[in-house]
Amino acid sequence: MSSKDQPRAAAIEIGINEMTLGLLGAAVLLYGAVLWCAHGPNAEKTDFSLTYVGARIVHQGLGSRLYDLDLQKQVRDSLFQHPNPLFFEHPPFEALMLSPLAALPFRTAYMLWGFVNATVWLLLIFLMRPHFPAPLEDLGYVALWLLFAPLGVALFQGQSSLILLALYAAAFVLLRQNSDFAAGAALGLGLFKFQFVLPFVLILVLRKQWRFLGGFCIAAVVLGILSLLTTGWHGIVTYVRFLLAIGTTPQNLSYGSAVDMPTIDGFVYAMIGGRIGHLGLSISVLALSVALLLFIARNWNAPRGSSADNLTFAAAVASSLLSGSHMFTHDFSPLLLAMFIALATLPPRSQRGLRAATLFTLVVLWLPPVYFVLVAFHDMYLMCPVLLLFALSAVLIKKYGRQDLSRESHHPQLTRA
């Protein structure tokens, strides 16, 4: 080995050691946190208790009454001393898939589901490293995964947001490999959070990505059949009515107050919702959401796999969250993909305003205290402008912020895998 190659080999060896060390530390932290939370006093108040209620109803063969709120209250009160006041509102197929956990005691089911989520988190850290070149240091890279508060909240709450992050990550990688059908099918499996998946799919439809749409539709049909088998037609109709009740009562704390949601819907409701009524609110939110998604679709025109293409993907993820509904802290989870993309493609120092805007959004979104303070004061809707600024900054970086993006447009092979 030449003297020139020795530092490079040493750097590779250090990088491997750093990643191994970081993953081991993360594993101890995450699995330890699951064990601690499973034996803690607040496990019954987590969102997983709602999922457990839904899974329990299906496990007992009462799927047709899954969205009977009186039945949910009855089952909830029979299981928990201090129950979570919210209701199970996810699609029927999720309750069916998790129904085997309902055969176990609640805390055992919570612990097992936590181990699944922690494992997904660790696998994502490892598998996505080749696609996220920044930061260069492996320990810093692992630290940023652990610092992102929504993932920790998802793990504690027993939410499925980490699974959705994994499906978005799969779609990202598959799209870069021109496997559009498989990417659509992967994202289609994320319909348990359909309010965030459908806006992203709409962007791809506006771009006439029909193979992606085909894969998505196949997954959607399969999940639709599972839902129908779970609840029957009557249960599906009841679920639709339940969703409409949630959408028409944004102030109802039992469904989740709109001011606690960092979406366009939550922001408009907090600003002018009391003055324009429900119809005016719905029209305003729909118009703003469609305009944003159209803007992203029109600007997604870069070669597949280039930095410009990645940046528009990042903007699309942020816009899909903004255009969704019923969003809480853990629902930020897919945004981490977009943040790593933006971190790797910061505009040069000559673009001071754009660089400052991008760094501002990244710092705010990566700081854990921001989320906890806004949740405590019921001001989470204030994150909507930050998300919007992030999405617009990603598009502007693609258009104006980096000189090397134009070179990649002619030479996509320059993009790091």
Image (cartoon, rainbow, N blue to C red):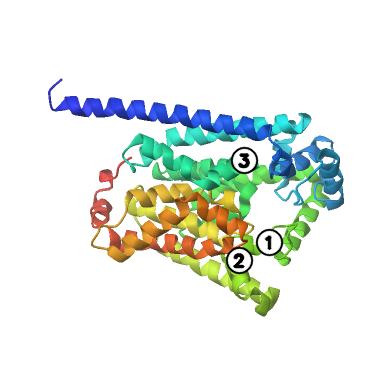
**Secondary structure of the residue carrying numbered label 3:** helix
* Other residues around mark 3 within 10 Å, as few (<14) / some (14–19) / many (≥20): many
Q: Residue at horizontal 29%, vertical 60%?
A: 401
Q: Nearer the viewer, residue 193 or 257?
A: 257
Rendered image: mark on residue 156: 3
What's the CA distance linking mark 2 and mark 1? 11 Å
The tag earlier along the polypeptide, 3 or 1, is 3
Q: Amino acid at mark 2?
A: Asp
Q: Residue at horizontal 47%, vertical 54%?
A: 365
Give the residue at mark 1: 257
Give the residue at mark 2: 265
When the figure is inspected, residue 353 is found, relative to residue 85, above or below; the finding is below
Q: Nearer the viewer, residue 361 or 248?
A: 361
Q: Residue at horizontal 78%, vertical 59%?
A: 241
* Image location (x, y in percent) of residue 22: 42, 31
The answer to whether 280 appears left or right of 390 in the picture is: right
